[in-house]
Image (cartoon, rainbow, N blue to C red):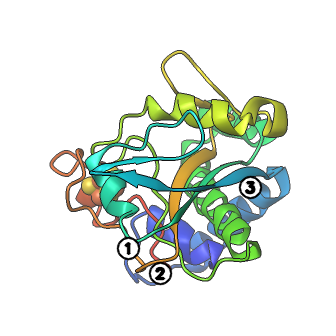
Amino acid sequence: MDIKKETLHYLGYTGQRLSEEENRRIDAAISEVCEAACPGTVHRVFPISRDEKRISIPADLDLNYSDLISLLSDSDEVLVLAATLGLELDRRLRYYARTDASRLVIMDAAASALVERVCDDLQKALPFEKYTFRFSPGYGDVPLLLQKQIVRVLETQKRIGLTLTRSLLMVPQKSITGIVGIGGASKKKSCEGCALFDTCEFRKRGTVCYATNG
Ligand code: SF4
């Protein structure tokens, strides 16, 4: 994944020409994100069992939501993962929230691009050829609450310092939890069926919340 391309994507750019000054500011923000980030990942792979229409895995993680059942319909195994960019990046983002709103917006976009790349790199390093797209709780009919089970199953606090607040926000803030089907037909993410479809701020800006690098 090209971090700059994806940063521009998250910022809502759709091929517009950037001025020298814009290029400079975006490059500087991306550099700072890469320098401040301390990426960590944790993952587990589970075999999927099917009984009638229900699916189960040997872990305390309930995957019986129609969007997840559909995601995993061609998969025999599921990859459960979490990734974070660490607390120092949060500290920088809080600093720019107080001092430089425009730098904050660019760094936030760059951090979103970077954490996706960390997940992509993790998946590439695993010995599997085909994956579905990464499905995160809060998308489709899968409640954010599922994150609680994921962080418990992956022991994210102990292994990468990733915790959840009572309102289910992740700390560090730039973190991802995801569920990915292994093998079978590759499935791409789309906005179809997303609970936020009508109110989505990304779509209003002409972009989407997920990486578009295929
Ligand atoms: S871009 Fe918006 S509508 Fe599309 S999947 Fe993301 S949150 Fe949902």
User: x%, y% of residue 170?
Assistant: 60, 32
Q: Nearer the viewer, residue 211 or 185?
A: 185
User: x%, y% of residue 149?
Assistant: 55, 31
Residue 12 falls left or right of residue 123: left
- The answer to whether one can see residue 157 in this image is yes
Question: Which mark sits nearer the N-terminus, 1 or 2?
Answer: 1
Of tags 3 and 2, the one toward the viewer is 2
Q: Is residue 95 above or below residue 30?
A: above
Q: How many marks?
A: 3
**Which residue is located at x 36 percent, y 35 percent?**
143
- Alpha-carbon neighbours of circle 2 within 10 Å: few (<14), some, or many (≥20)? few
User: x%, y% of residue 186?
Assistant: 43, 79
The residue most toward the left is 198
Between the residue at mark 3 and the residue at mark 2, the CA separation in whole angstroms equals 23 Å
Which label was assigned to residue 33? Answer: 3
Which label was assigned to residue 188? Answer: 1
Amino acid on which the number 1 mark rests in the picture: Lys
The residue most toward the top is 166
Residue 97 falls left or right of residue 89: left
Splitting the image into four quadrants, where does ligand 1 fall? bottom left
Dot 1 falls on a residue whose secondary structure is loop
Between the residue at mark 1 and the residue at mark 2, the CA separation in whole angstroms equals 8 Å
Amino acid on which the number 3 mark rests in the picture: Val
**Which residue is located at x 30 percent, y 53 percent?**
67
Residue where numbered disc 2 is placed: 214
Of tags 3 and 1, the one toward the viewer is 1
Between the residue at mark 3 and the residue at mark 1, the CA separation in whole angstroms equals 28 Å
Residue 78 falls left or right of residue 206: right
- The answer to whether one can see residue 202 in this image is no
Question: Which mark sits nearer the N-terminus, 3 or 2?
Answer: 3
